Image (cartoon, rainbow, N blue to C red):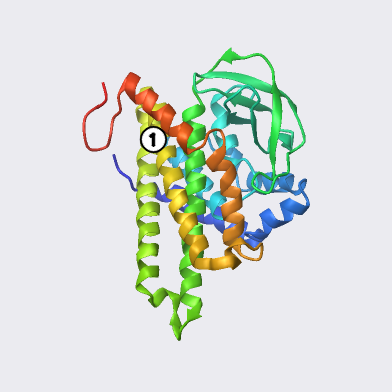
Amino acid sequence: MNTELATEAVDFERSVRSALEASGGFELVQRAETEPAYRQSIGDQLAALGMWDIDARADDLQLAAAALSCRTAGWFALPYPLAERLAARQLQGAEAVAVASGASPRFAHADLGLDWFVIGLDGRSAPVVTAHPAVGGKLGRFVAPVELGAWSRSADVAPMVLVLQCWTLLGMLQSAQELTCNHVRDRHQFGQALAAFQSVQFALTEVSVATQGLEELCKYTLWAVRHRPEDALTDALALRTAALEAAETAFRTGHQLHGAIGFCDETPISWLSRYSQTLRRLPFGRSDTESLLAGRISRFGFYTPVVEKVGE
């Protein structure tokens, strides 16, 4: 397995990032909060970049382009279901797919008017027949409850959704890390920059280790979900477990080092932190993810990059 992603995919990510920066960067999510309908135009911008021509299941190049695009979307907390749309090509009739759990599913951007399908971890799917208005909470601004049609057997799309969502979360963490590093270099106390304090350096090192480790695991899982589909769900749950743990480290440290200003809307890390909550809590939080992963390992074992299959 080669963890270096294709040059063409990396170049495409740069184009996407440049386009989003030119459109306003973090201003996109700020505007969407006051004008929810503005999210439709974000989809149009992504279409103009050729985003909906990507078939993540077709080959490694397109899969890498999809993943890196999700990372860039996460970098700016883009208020649009990019991962969910890129994963939908496998399911006939679906424009977007969401993994959901429980009898009353809810997920972000269900109100956008797309042909949504809900996917279960057992491989079944159900169309969304009614999307209710978004609940509008501070930590889930665009999350909306839905009503479903009949469940049926379909392609196993859930692992791809979970993996691409983890790439989105990776982008959020890397963006938060950069914002925090810039803040401690610019902020001075007791006659020196915050970055000069050893305790701050230790904290930032912990964040760096978490985000770099998550990036490598994201690359590995991206390869595994395509080339070892029989274990794709276990790999996806393992990645989600690691991503949620890394998110706690990155945002806890980011808020600590930003201080009170880190919770103000004038600071981008506040937007990243709040919008990460949807990804971190839905379709299931850290405890439920760990429980699901443990159940999969007990039944099917677990491959790792360094040892043979374990757990059987």
Residue 114 relative to residue 185: left or right: right
Q: Label 1, on which residue?
A: 238
Instruction: Between residue 164 and residue 250, name the one nearer to us.
Output: 250
Is 213 rendered above or below residue 258? Answer: above
Residue 42 point in image, percent of width and height? 68, 48
Instruction: Between residue 289 and residue 163, name the one nearer to us.
Output: 289
Residue 142 point in image, percent of width and height? 69, 42
Residue 137 point in image, percent of width and height? 70, 45
Q: How many marks?
A: 1
Could you say which quadrant of the image residue 232 lies in?
Answer: top left
Residue 67 relative to residue 76: left or right: left
Instruction: Between residue 224 and residue 101, name the one nearer to us.
Output: 101
Could you say which quadrant of the image residue 108 lies in?
Answer: top right
Residue 131 relative to residue 200: left or right: right
Please rate how many residues cluster around mark 1, counting C-alpha atoms within 10 Å: few if below 14, some from 14 to 19, many from 20. many
Residue 97 point in image, percent of width and height? 60, 30
Is 278 rendered above or below residue 119? Answer: below
Image quadrant containing the C terminus: top left
Does residue 57 appear in the picture of this structure? no
Residue at 35%, 27% (x, y): give it. 228
Image quadrant containing the N terminus: top left
Instruction: Between residue 131 and residue 154, name the one nearer to us.
Output: 131
Q: Looking at numbered disc 1 in the image, what kind of residue is underneath it? A: Ala
Does residue 29 appear in the picture of this structure? yes
Q: Secondary structure at mark 1?
A: helix
Residue at 21%, 29% (x, y): give it. 308
